[in-house]
Image (cartoon, rainbow, N blue to C red):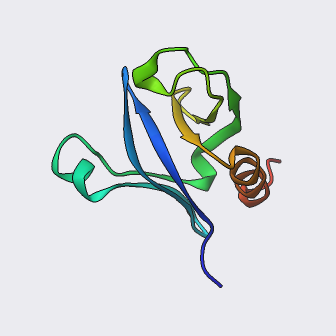
Amino acid sequence: MTDPSWQCNRAIGRGMIPGRLELTRTHVVFEPGRLAKRTAGLRFSVRLEHIAAVGVAPGTGGWRSGGKRDRLCLTLGDGSEQFFVLADIEAALQAIRIALPARG
């Protein structure tokens, strides 16, 4: 079985980096597209146990940052947030929520 993944854009500052968001057994990983790798695209990876919450955040309205489209929001244990714009936000949200370790 392959890991679920989604084409997406990662919000960085006031811009977007195209790439792919992947859910593995232990991590959520963003891999920038080929062209983005050569410019400003940075790989992002976080262990599932370091994700404090996953949800949907409204878009900012800025055309360079995904417009008014809702974003997948990963809130990390340190309080920082990572945002991703993707077409099937509900599928990604559900898959990541299911994969998160139970909190005791």
- Left or right, 16 with respect to 54, comes to left
Residue 63: x and y in percent read 45, 20
Residue 66: x and y in percent read 50, 28
| Residue found 53% across the figure and 39% down from its top | 84
| Residue found 53% across the figure and 22% down from its top | 67
Q: Front-most of 92 and 27?
A: 92
Residue 10, quarter of the rendered image: top left
Residue 26, quarter of the rendered image: bottom right
Vertical placement of residue 8 versus 73, above or below: below
Q: Front-most of 89 and 104?
A: 89
| Residue found 74% across the figure and 56% down from its top | 101
Residue 77: x and y in percent read 58, 36
Residue at the extreme bottom = 1
Vertical placement of residue 13 versus 44, above or below: above
Residue 81: x and y in percent read 53, 29
- Left or right, 95 with respect to 80, comes to right
Q: Quadrant of the N terminus?
A: bottom right
Vertical placement of residue 22 versus 51, above or below: below
Residue at the extreme left = 38
Residue 69, quarter of the rendered image: top right
The image shows a total of numbered marks equal to: 0
| Residue found 22% across the figure and 40% down from its top | 40
